[in-house]
Amino acid sequence: MKTFITGATGFVGSHVARQLADGGADLRLLVRSTSRRDNIEGLRADLVTGDLTDAESLRRGMEGCDFVFHVAADYRLWMKDPSGMYASNVAGTEAVIRAAQQAGVRRVIYTSSVATMGFGYSAVAVDEDTPVTEADMIGHYKRSKYLAEQKAVQMARAGANVVIVNPSAPIGEQDIKPTPTGRILVDFLKKKFPAYVETGLNLVDVKDVAKGHLLAMENGRSGERYILGGEDMTLKQILDTLGEITGLPSPSIKLPYAVAYLSGACDTFFTGVLMGREPRVTLDSVRMGRKMMWVSSAKAERELGYQHGPVRDALRRAAEWFVAHGHAPAYGEACATA
């Protein structure tokens, strides 16, 4: 089985690539000339230099392949110019599916996100059928992923064989950038979490997410979306669990939303707009935090055979990886005894 993967040098994509390789697949990976390749070191694969806007590199990469895993995405919560994000996430997704059709690929597995779901302000898990519109999308990342997902659904209805998976917030090793979720852990490890806000996330082991991709390849229905989630947790529960794992103190002060909003607005304006650097706390992230981003994976469990394990081990592995790779200082012997 020959598979073409975009985003294999990244967090989720590297886990998908390694699980495919473990299953005996022949890999062909799209890599940019500027990409760090730490996550694919030692992986037997053919590398195709290019990107999502380079139609020729997509054509070369997919030639003779059975399946395409489109995992690559521009995942940031702040940028000076969002046009590049839409080019990668929206136009890039259309280009990948179009190239796969032209190459005669059997199926495309497209990695979307639960960011496209219709979250509310109550602690109720949403699913693939929860009503949502583009107006519900906060920030350019969510909006670009929503538009890309809509494009994938439209192309599936027009005849393309595309299965869509929607991971929640993956946690684990190889979060090389790190992602915005990974930065929560890094900030905690750096003791930069003096207070917390009342919000909720669904955390999932990145290894379970990768398994879900393979199950979507085998069992998914074209045009359908499948949430790949794990455990619903409040931010306080996440920080408390990290405290138990590392021995570091978990914050006890809850920050009112108005204070968090003002902090995000100031940081976005002064650090982002005036200084041209990425803010530590963006206004979009604060606005997203008002919603409880809890999800149900019942559809994936029922149709794909998807299962997820406890997230505590993924948090431990992630913390160890961030320390080992210089993202955060060592936190003593508490890690070994957790």
Image (cartoon, rainbow, N blue to C red):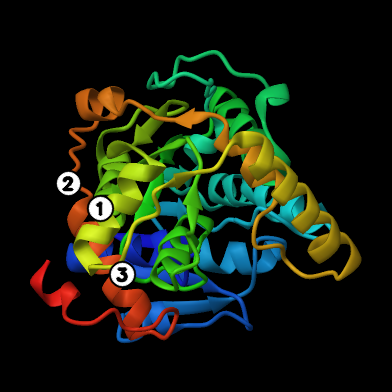
Identify the residue at horizontal 46%, vertical 18% (top origin): 122
Mark 1 element type:
helix
Q: Which residue is mark 3?
A: 319
Between the residue at mark 2 and the residue at mark 1, the CA separation in whole angstroms equals 12 Å
User: x%, y% of residue 102?
Assistant: 59, 48
Asked whether 313 or 132 is in front, the reply is: 313
The kind of residue tagged 1 is: Thr
Identify the residue at horizontal 71%, vertical 62% (top origin): 279
The kind of residue tagged 3 is: Ala
Between the residue at mark 1 and the residue at mark 3, the CA separation in whole angstroms equals 11 Å
Front: mark 2 or 1:
1
The kind of residue tagged 2 is: Pro
Q: Which residue is mark 1?
A: 241
User: x%, y% of residue 78?
Assistant: 72, 56
User: Seen in the image, is 116 located left or right of residue 279?
Assistant: left
Between the residue at mark 2 and the residue at mark 3, the CA separation in whole angstroms equals 16 Å
User: x%, y% of residue 142?
Assistant: 64, 40
Residue 74 visible, this orientation: yes
Identify the residue at horizontal 22%, vertical 29% (top origin): 301
Q: In which quadrant of the rendered view does residue 2 lie?
A: bottom left
Front: mark 2 or 3:
3
First-in-chain label (2 vs 1) = 1
